[in-house]
């Protein structure tokens, strides 16, 4: 599994591992590294909203909610200052690309 360090915001706030993007998000319930693609249809979860209960990310493409706690369990990560280090799924030698993805205001809360 690749261990990757990247920025929590701004340029290079995303890493792609085997073409799957991951971003660091901040909600009122804390920060996490999450897949930036909806598990249902591949929509941009980096642009999701958070449901009223604060428990689900709502995909902007099809409005399906995905459990935030389930997504958080997928990627162990530790934040230190303006960077985060995460253990991402996949073989250790898989190519990793740093890139940028915008975040919805709901996922950039509590900067």
Image: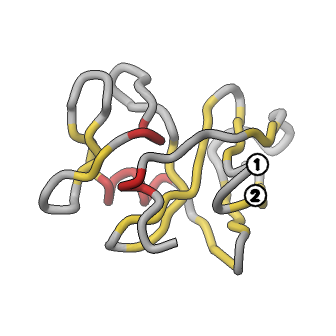
Question: x%, y% of residue 12?
Answer: 76, 48
Mark 1 element type: loop
Residue at the extreme front: 105
Question: Rounded to the nearest whole Å, what is the CA distance between mark 1 and mark 2?
Answer: 7 Å
Question: Looking at the image, which residue is at 31% across and 34% down?
Answer: 59
Is mark 1 in CB contact (under 8 Å) with mark 2?
A: yes
Q: Residues within 10 Å of mark 2 (few under 14, many from 20)?
A: many
Foreground pick, 103 / 93: 103
Disc 2 target residue: 6
> What secondary structure is found at the residue carrying circle 2?
strand
Image quarter of residue 18:
top right
User: Which residue corresponds to the image point at 33% horizontal and 73% vertical from the top-left?
Assistant: 29
Residue 108 lies left or right of residue 85; in this view the side is left
Q: Position of residue 48 (x, y in %)?
A: 35, 41
Relative placement, left or right, of 70 versus 107 is left
**Residue 42 appears in which quarter of the rendering?**
top left
Residue at the disc numbered 1:
12
First in sequence, mark 1 or 2: give its number: 2
> What residue do we see at 39% from left, 31% from top?
38
Residue at the bottom extreme of this rendering: 81
> Residue 69 location, x and y as percent?
32, 59
Mark nearer the viewer, 1 or 2? 1
Please name the residue shown 78% across and 60% down the image: 5
| Classed neighbour count for the residue bearing mark 1: other residues with Cα under 10 Å, few (<14), some (14–19), many (≥20) | some
Exactly how many numbered labels are in the figure?
2
Residue toward you, 110 or 97 = 110
């Amino acid at each position: 599994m690749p261990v990757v360090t990247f920025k929590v915001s701004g340029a290079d706030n995303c890493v792609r591992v085997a073409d799957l993007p991951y971003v660091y998000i901040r909600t009122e319930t804390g920060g996490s590294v999450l897949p930036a693609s909806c598990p249902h249809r591949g929509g941009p979860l980096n642009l999701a909203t958070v449901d009223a209960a604060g428990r689900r990310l709502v995909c902007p493409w099809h409005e399906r909610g995905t459990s935030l706690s389930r997504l958080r369990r997928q990627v162990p990560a530790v934040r230190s200052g303006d960077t985060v280090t995460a253990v991402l799924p996949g073989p250790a030698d898989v190519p990793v690309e740093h890139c940028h993805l915008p975040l919805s205001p709901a996922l950039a809360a509590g900067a």
